[in-house]
Amino acid sequence: MKKDDEHDVKKTEDKTSSMKKKASKEMNINKIRADFPILTRNVNGKQLIYLDNAATSQKPTKVIEAEAEFYRKHNANVHRGVHTLSQEATELYEEARQKVEEFINARSRNEIIFTRSATESLILYFMVTHCQNSNQETR
Ligand SMILES: Cc1ncc(COP(=O)(O)O)c(C=O)c1O
């Protein structure tokens, strides 16, 4: 393994270990549920428990508010306009990319690609890796 890769693995292990310690200390289901307003609903006379996250994930209040704030104040094309709203939307989009990069400990912001769905992500991943392999075979 290359020195850079060893460093990355060690960094990821340290971060994972500290996240696990933090999570086990702080995991409080009722506190987490309180972040999701939809989970205060009763369905069929029972407290809602939602498990269909692969199809559609529920949103915590912070996400709902951030999305509403975006649509109220900044909604515009990202990376495709020169007007103020488009510039603001692009800046917010890139800030989100930066946060995801830090959160998953990616090597670069360029590794973060937002897609519409899990299916689209998998197809994109397949196409990129398939093309890389095909290019290597033809060299
Ligand atoms: C269990 C399960 N996995 C994966 C998916 C794919 O999700 P996406 O719409 O993000 O491609 C779905 C979509 O309904 C699903 O129900």
Image (cartoon, rainbow, N blue to C red):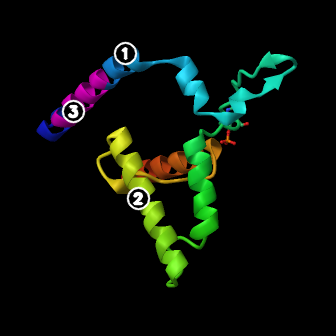
Observer-nearest of 16 and 35: 35
The image quadrant where one finds the N terminus is top left
Q: Nearer the viewer, mark 1 or mark 2?
A: 1
Name the quadrant containing residue 110: bottom left
The CA distance from mark 3 to mark 1 is 21 Å
* Residue situated furthest bottom in the rendering: 82
Label located before the other in sequence (1 or 2):
1
Name the quadrant containing residue 91: bottom left
For badge 1, the amino acid type reads: Lys
Residue identified by numbered label 2: 95
The image quadrant where one finds the C terminus is bottom left
For badge 2, the amino acid type reads: Glu
Q: Quadrant of ligand 1?
A: top right
Callout 2 secondary element: helix
Q: Is residue 102 magenta?
A: no
Where residue 57 appears, as percent x and y from the top left, is 65, 36
Observer-nearest of 22 and 125: 22
Residue identified by numbered label 1: 25
Residue identified by numbered label 3: 11
Where residue 7 appears, as percent x and y from the top left, is 16, 35
Where is 55 relative to 92, above or below?
A: above
Observer-nearest of 29 and 118: 29
Observer-nearest of 38 and 102: 38
| Residue at 61% over, 42% down | 118
For badge 3, the amino acid type reads: Lys
Where residue 90 appears, as percent x and y from the top left, is 47, 69
The CA distance from mark 1 to mark 2 is 29 Å
Magenta residue span:
7-18
Label located before the other in sequence (3 or 1):
3
Q: Nearer the viewer, mark 2 or mark 3?
A: 2
